[in-house]
Amino acid sequence: MPDVICHLDALLTARGMTLADLARQVGVTQVNLSVLKNNRAKAIRFSTLTAICDVLEVQPGDIFTVE
């Protein structure tokens, strides 16, 4: 089964943004974003994904790749 890889860490670094900053702007806990960032998440709500994309000004394909 292919793995979905999250590139949230690189996106945050490129923007000089912390996980706490993103969590605050998205409206989710830092713990939830940490699970996502560390590739331990099994799912993500579309509303959360949309909010992350809006804050980072990216598309879902910029956040995730499938290997």
Image (cartoon, rainbow, N blue to C red):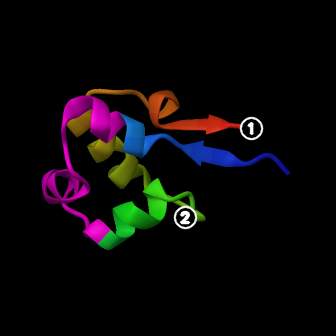
Q: Is residue 66 magenta?
A: no
Location of mark 2 (residue)? 41
Q: In terms of secondary structure, what is the magenta stretch mainly?
A: helix
Check the image and report above or below for 45 versus 58.
Answer: below
Q: Which residues are magenta?
A: 11-30
| Mark identifier at residue 14 | none
Q: Which callout, 1 or 2, points at the residue further toward the start of the chain?
A: 2
Q: Looking at the picture, which amino acid does disc 2 mark?
A: Ala
Q: Which residue is located at x 34 percent, y 52 percent?
A: 47
Q: Is residue 42 left or right of residue 22?
A: right
Q: Quadrant of residue 31?
A: bottom left
Check the image and report above or below for 67 versus 61.
Answer: below
Q: Residues within 10 Å of mark 1 (few under 14, many from 20)?
A: few
Location of mark 1 (residue)? 67
Question: Does the image show residue 40?
Answer: yes
Q: Position of residue 58 (x, y in %)?
A: 34, 27
Q: CA distance from mark 1 to mark 2?
A: 16 Å
Image quadrant for the C terminus?
top right
User: Are dots 1 and 2 in contact, CB under 8 Å?
Assistant: no
Q: Position of residue 46 (x, y in %)?
A: 43, 50
Q: Nearer the viewer, residue 54 or 19?
A: 19
Q: Position of residue 13 (x, y in %)?
A: 29, 37
SS type, badge 1: loop
Q: Residues within 10 Å of mark 2 (few under 14, many from 20)?
A: some
Q: Looking at the picture, which amino acid does disc 1 mark?
A: Glu
Q: Which residue is located at x 65 percent, y 46 percent?
A: 4
Q: Position of residue 8 (x, y in %)?
A: 41, 44
Q: Quadrant of residue 9?
A: top left
Q: Is residue 9 left or right of residue 30?
A: right
